[in-house]
Image (tube, grey):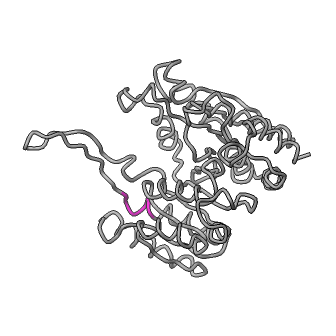
Amino acid sequence: MPLIALLPGDGIGPEVIAEAVRVLDAAGCALDFQQAAVGGAAYRESGHPLPETTLDLARRADAILFGAVGDPACDTLERRLRPEQAILGLRRELALFANLRPAKLFAELADASALRPEVAAEIDLVIVRELNGDVYFGEKGMRTTPAGRRQGYDVMAYDEDEVARIARVGFETAMARGRTLCSVDKANVLETSQLWRDVVTEIASEYPQVALSHMYVDNAAMQLVRNPGQFDVIVTGNLFGDILSDQASMCAGSIGMLPSASLDSAGKGLYEPIHGSAPDIAGQGKANPLATILSAAMMLRYSLGRAEEADRIEAAVAAALAGGARTPDLGGTLSTSQMGDAVIEALA
């Protein structure tokens, strides 16, 4: 029986994870769930956001289902102890370098998108985001200038092997979809992006079936709003991917709807909704669990090889929405658990 590490984390994390587990159980998925603390919750328990016991469970597990981290009470801690370091640490320690973030508009949610319905209806894309490099993991710190002023710095860096590795994931993802890939960078300003563009272009020769294009990140942000239907697969770096995927989520209706998978080279993955811990609504039953439920479906498909069960859960989410089920972020009144109930009812 596959071992699944449950890392609920902070804020609404425990609420949405609980609903995903209920749906997996209702779908008849035989899984061994083991839970551990992470983020601010772990810091309060053990003094560190990613305790060794949690990391050990994550290493042993066949896959990881992750909630969210982030706690305003921890904002004044030194950076290495803040909740967000837990997810960065897991990505680094488990070599989870490839983040897949699908964005597709459910037809029933066209009115929830910030875009005109006819524009939003065209959204069906995957953002492939590199996770182990860029400013998130580069040298950083605070220093004093010769004039005696404080200066913060974060180094953006990629080497060619890191770029080639994520580029191949982008091309492989495109091969399984519409065979078009857009590489997003800022090569007109950044040397890091120039290397990125050069290497992606080199890797393209291995995939002659895929049509490759390049786009500056500022233009990509504009095009996601203007004409999102032009995109099939986007491959980009850590910082740009973080920003563009959140933008894509609102084009698709709500950040509460988008799942993600963070994969290593062997297919082991960490699965999480792209939203944060939302401490302002934690414990109130207002959180939308669908992104986490859809993340669980991605876990079945990518790490456990259970595509049929994944299809059933995704179809149940669509059916629940078609039946009018809505949490507050989607303009409805259902609680977190009631939305879970609606998906489970659709499964039946």
In reply to whether residue 40 is colored magenta, the answer given is no
Q: Position of residue 271 (x, y in %)?
A: 63, 45
Q: Position of residue 267 (x, y in %)?
A: 64, 52
| Residue 186 can be seen in this image | yes
Judge left or right: residue 325 versus residue 243.
right
- The quadrant in which the C terminus is found is top right
Question: Residue at the spot x=62%, y=27% of the render?
Answer: 36
Question: Residue at the spot x=57%, y=25% of the render?
Answer: 53
In reply to whether residue 160 is colored magenta, the answer given is yes
Dominant SS of magenta comes to helix
| Residue 312 can be seen in this image | no
Magenta stretch: give its range.
158-163
Question: Residue at the spot x=37%, y=58% of the render?
Answer: 158
Residue furthest top in the image: 45
Q: Position of residue 68 (x, y in %)?
A: 57, 37
Q: Residue 296's image quarter? A: top right
Q: Residue 181's image quarter? A: bottom right
Number of marks drawn: 0
* Residue 208 in the image: above or below residue 322: below
Q: Position of residue 106 (x, y in %)?
A: 72, 60
Judge left or right: residue 347 versus residue 41.
right
101 and 138: which is toward the camera: 101
